[in-house]
């Protein structure tokens, strides 16, 4: 299926965190302005993949996206906890998002990234298969998890499901991931 790049030429992918940030600073625009209801809130989401499954994290909670670095393993932690990394002097625990969600591990290849989440001083790195782009979603585009018929999901990490094109993506709750 063709990829839909938001605020970018067809087929273009952001190559750096700075490019993603510059996309995020552009005014929020909906691909279907007439479909937007008056006063409806628009939020920005960082689209990413774990294996073939598409996910998204609210951009406000994403501190940065970095290339994978060697990790210092931690003994006695859950299998999904890969270890800790040094991010400019800051110790950041790194978790495999796919394993944490009970799906497949994020393969280590040229597209693998670590998405660093930060909220209220809490920080966490998530290893993902790929980072896609930034998407603008209006509240009406987001289905709550209990009404989303895409898959029977009962996971408190899921905020809902949204569709861009034909491909559904699961919206993750960054606050609960950090908690």
Image (cartoon, helix red, strand yellow):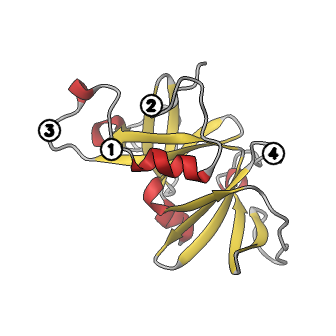
Residues at marks 4 and 2 touching, judged by CB atoms closer than 8 Å? no
What residue does disc 2 label?
A: 163
Within 10 angstroms of label 3, few (less than 14), some, or many (20 or more) residues? few
Decide which of 150, 56 is in the foreground and name it. 56
- The residue labelled by disc 1 is 27
- Residue 3 rendering spot, x and y as whole percentages: 57, 25
Up/down of 178 relative to 166, above or below: below
Q: Crowdedness of circle 2 by 10 Å Cα count: few (<14), some, many (20+)?
A: few
Gap in angstroms between the C-alphas marked 3 and 1: 16 Å
Callout in the foreground (2, 3): 3
Disc 2 secondary structure class: strand
Q: Give the mark toward the camera: 4 or 1.
A: 1
Badge 4, how many Cα within 10 Å: few under 14, some, many 20+? some
For numbered disc 4, what is the local secondary structure? loop
Q: Position of residue 115 (x, y in %)?
A: 63, 57
Q: Which residue is mark 3?
A: 38
Question: Sequence-wise, which precedes: disc 2 or disc 3?
Answer: 3
Q: Which residue sits at x=60%, y=40%? A: 14
Res. 84 mark: none
Asked whether the residues under the numbered discs 2 and 1 touch, taking CB atoms below 8 Å apart as contact, a structural biologist would say: no
N-term mark: 4 or 2: 4
64 shown above or below 162: below
Rendered location of residue 28, percent (x, y) = 33, 42
Q: Which residue is mark 4?
A: 107
């Amino acid at each position: 299926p063709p990829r839909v790049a938001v605020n970018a030429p067809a087929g273009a992918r952001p190559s750096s965190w700075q490019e993603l940030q510059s996309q995020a600073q552009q005014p929020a625009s909906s691909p279907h302005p007439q479909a937007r209801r008056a006063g409806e809130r628009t939020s920005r989401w960082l689209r990413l993949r774990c294996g073939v499954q598409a996910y998204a994290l609210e951009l406000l909670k994403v501190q940065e996206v970095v290339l994978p670095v060697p990790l210092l393993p931690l003994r006695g932690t859950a299998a999904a906890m890969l270890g800790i990394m040094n991010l400019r002097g800051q110790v950041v625990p790194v978790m495999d998002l796919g394993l944490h969600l009970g799906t497949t591990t994020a393969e280590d290849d040229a597209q693998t990234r670590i998405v660093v989440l930060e909220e209220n001083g809490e920080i966490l790195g998530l290893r993902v298969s790929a980072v896609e782009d930034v998407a603008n979603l209006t509240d009406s585009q987001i289905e709550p998890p209990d009404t989303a018929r895409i898959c029977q999901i009962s996971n408190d990490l899921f905020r809902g499901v949204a569709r861009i094109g034909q491909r559904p993506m699961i919206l993750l709750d960054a606050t609960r991931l950090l908690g």
